[in-house]
Image: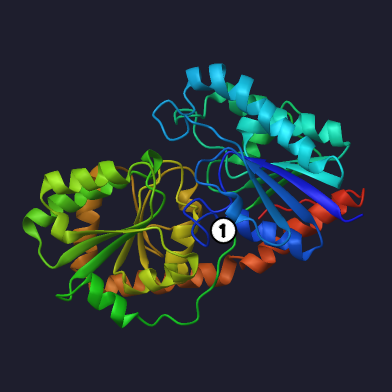
Amino acid sequence: MKKTIVHIAPFPIQNMGKGKGRVSTYLPLKGLVKNGYDNIYITNSPYASPDDSEPGIEVVTIKDPFTKTKYAYSRLYMLLFYYPVIYPQFIYHAIRKGRKRNVAAVICHSYWLAFVGYVLARIFKAKYISKFYGIGMPSLPGHPDLLRKSSFWYPADLFIITNDGSNGYEYALKRGVSADKIAFLRNGIEKQANLNKDDLLYKRLAPNNEKLLLTVSRLVSSKNVDKIIDAFYELSKTMSGIRLVIVGDGLQRKELETKVSQLGISDRVCFVGAVYHKDIFRYQSVADIFISMNAISSLSNPVFEAMASGRCVIALDRGATRELIKDGQNGIVIESFDELKDAIISLLSNPDRIARLGLQAKKTIDDTWLSWEERIQIEMEMINSLCDNKTPQVCIR
């Protein structure tokens, strides 16, 4: 019987619609399909739909009326609803879908669901894999430190932790996980040979040949897009010929659009919304400067993509940002939001420096980063070994 992998996650496969966002989840799933596995992906995200299913990937959605409200992932929500109501639904749907299948592994995609993943692996007598996309910050909603710690209490056969700059490898070791069970991997990148500007897109975004500042992210509080808007507003008081382009969508979008309107800069700020991943590089190609003010770290896909496109990046010094971006060599690293305005002014006054930093950024990615195909192959080899009852060779990159 064909092997099946059960996935449980609080987010959809692609969190901004089909073909938009979460390539770090979608591409490995496609890799599993290519390696001959059927996949059952169970989620309580309101942004997921059974229509997201495709050959080899069946999406099962759990109705959760609170995930689009301010109460989502609050302590009260977790205690009164998530644990007693949502947890049992994950278990029920997994058993219902998997009971007549050859379940080889259960992959838990979030430490919120680690207990459920462990229970399901025991029920199916399958391998248990914890896959964490970084470890977040205890101060963020839904990230209390006790919840993070508890996710490492349940013995997994393999921990796959994204190296997003939040020091997940060290954290796992502190929680008592053996090093031979931790795969610590950066996301891959689609390396770009063609750096030509998309002239049609540029004319649409910059009708008067303005300089373009770009940020790409989910519009949530941890991305600090509001701080980018604040800096741009201060810039706009004294500098003309610049525009801010914001690509992405999320719970904060309406709030951010309102803020821009109240500041009176709506004509100079463009909210693009979510775009297909294949189109991200079109937006990168027209940017003069890419800005990342991520509260956790700038070891994120939008930054990798900007650097691969030869863009000059300004990033906030958080987490392991400096492992990737060397200030003044392949980008600009600032210590606080207050420095953002001056960093932009300094760069825009020196176009040659923008070009030099962009070229060095591209060289950094080309010389040191794995492609998505290479990155996924590493993950597939480990999962295949586990499902064949062999000991996987873990990788740190």
Horizontal and vertical percent position of residue 365? 52, 68
* Camera-side residue of 134 and 176: 134
The answer to whether residue 187 is left or right of residue 394 is: left
Where is mark 1, residue-wise? 23
Horizontal and vertical percent position of residue 322? 46, 51
Name the quadrant containing residue 114.
top right
Q: Say if 60 sits above or below 171 in the image.
A: below
Image point 46% across, 50% down: which residue? 321
The answer to whether residue 186 is left or right of residue 157 is: left
Quadrant of image for the N terminus: bottom right
Residue 305 in view in this figure: yes
Q: Say if 36 sits above or below 281 in the image.
A: above
The answer to whether residue 265 is left or right of residue 310 is: left
Query: What is the secondary structure assignment of the residue under circle 1?
Result: helix
Name the quadrant containing residue 174.
top right
Image point 56% across, 49% down: which residue? 49
Please rate how many residues cluster around mark 1, counting C-alpha atoms within 10 Å: few if below 14, some from 14 to 19, many from 20: some
Specify the farthest residue to the left. Answer: 238
Residue 174 in view in this figure: no
Horizontal and vertical percent position of residue 111? 63, 33
Quadrant of image for the C terminus: bottom right
* Camera-side residue of 337 and 285: 285
Name the quadrant containing residue 134.
top right
Image point 38% across, 83% down: which residue? 196
Image point 49% across, 17% down: which residue? 76
* Camera-side residue of 379 and 46: 46
Colour style of the rendered protein structure: rainbow
Three-letter code for the amino acid on which mark 1 is drawn: Val
Horizontal and vertical percent position of residue 139? 44, 28
